[in-house]
Amino acid sequence: MTNNQKNELAEEKTSIDVTSPETHYIVQCNDIRLISSSLRPLVSETEVDEKSSFTFRVKAVVEGNIAYSYLEVQTSYYIPDSLEGVQGFQLSYVLMGTFNADEEMNSTDLAHFIKMYTLSILWPYAREYASDQLRRAGESQVILPIINPQVVTEHIVENNLVEVEIVKENEQ
């Protein structure tokens, strides 16, 4: 946008300006990477349970004001009209998000942030990756559902299902 152009949306009463620092959270996700991936055909001579399933887990490591959060996903997708001998696919992969916090946030608070927000931030990437891999294998289905991250996060936090290790405290 040049100096002569106006930001028309900023003038709308229903718009929200997030330019100022007070609207930004003090933690930012700087990078999301694929750490590992495996796609295998599901082949069986006998009849199998043809119900597709998926599971995930969240782990994180906090080093001072940097956190590495891992979303590990495993899914078995069964094809209704299977190909010759292939009933579907098993896809396993790990995504890592790198988060940086402002210096004023201590490691314990960063660990809590990671525990609460990893799923909300990384799940859309997990869905896209799974769908992309199956598209490349000839299937056009979206295999990971849209989830309500608030409900799922509440469940995993209440049941202490997120492993967070603080290996280095933030020096303040």
Image (tube, rainbow, N blue to C red):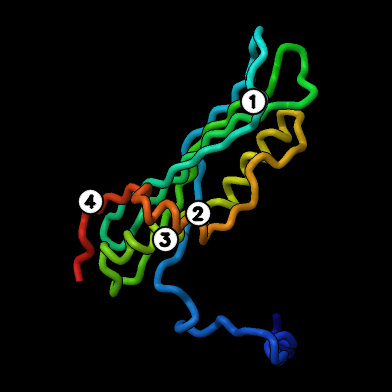
Point 35% across, 56% down: residue:
67
Circle 2 sits on which residue?
152
Residue 116: mark in rendering: 3
How far apart, in angstroms, are the residues tagged by discs 4 and 2? 26 Å
Question: Could you tell me residue 13's position as x and y percent?
Answer: 70, 92
* Amino acid type indicated by mark 3: Met
The label on residue 89 is 1
Nearer the observer, disc 2 or disc 3? 2
Secondary structure at badge 1 equals strand
Residue 12 as seen in the image, left or right of residue 116: right
Label 1 with label 4: CB-CB less than 8 Å: no
Name the disc covering residue 167, or none.
4
Quarter of the image for residue 7 reads bottom right
Q: In the rendered image of this protein, does residue 37 appear above or below residue 170? A: above
Which label's residue is closer to the chain start, 4 or 2?
2
Residue 18 image offset from top left, x and y in percent: 56, 81
Q: Is residue 46 above or below residue 148?
A: above
Residue depicted at x 64% and y 17%: 48
Residue at point 64%, 47% (across, down): 145
Disc on the earlier residue, 1 or 4: 1
Amino acid at pointer 4: Val
Q: Quadrant of the N terminus?
A: bottom right
